[in-house]
Image (cartoon, helix red, strand yellow):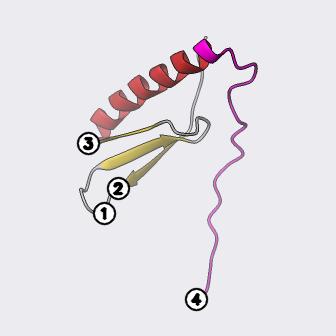
Amino acid sequence: MQYQFTVIIERDPESGWLVGSVAELPGCYTQAPTLAELEANMHEAILVYMETIAEQETPDPFPTFVGLQRLDVTI
């Protein structure tokens, strides 16, 4: 079965590395120095996460991702 996930990518200000987290999979994240390496690492992290969920026999393991929203805040 094929799934599609939303990956949020940020740059760590201290290391300069890219950090990716999967919006639909809480706790599923990885990092890498380049976008290509991050993509490969994300695939691996998602596979490990999915294997772990399958072992737990959770009926509906994926939260529903609603979206991202930018907010303007005046300070």
Q: Which residue is mark 4?
A: 75
State which tag comes first along the sequence, 4 or 3. Answer: 3
- Residues under numbered marks 4 and 1 in contact, where contact means CB atoms less than 8 Å apart: no
Q: Please name the residue that numbered disc 1 is placed on.
A: 13
Tag 2, which secondary structure?
strand
Q: Position of residue 40 (x, y in %)?
A: 34, 28
Residue 29 point in image, percent of width and height: 44, 39
Q: Which circle marks residue 11 in the picture? A: 2
**As shown in the figure, which amino acid type bears the numbered disc 4?**
Ile
Instruction: Locate residue 36, reporting x and y percent.
Output: 29, 34
Q: Residues within 10 Å of mark 3 (few under 14, many from 20)?
A: few
Residue for point 24% across, 44% down: 33
Residue sticking out furthest to the bottom: 75
Circle 2 residues within 10 Å: few <14, some 14–19, many ≥20: some
Q: Which residue ends up furthest to the front in the rendered image? A: 56
Counting residues from the N terminus, which is met first, the one under dot 3 or under dot 2? 2
- Identify the secondary structure beneath mark 3: loop
Report whether 55 appears left or right of 8: right
The vertical placement of 58 against 37, above or below, is: above
* Magenta highlight range: 55-75
- As displayed, is residue 50 above or below residue 23? above
Query: Alpha-carbon distance for marks 4 and 3?
Result: 34 Å
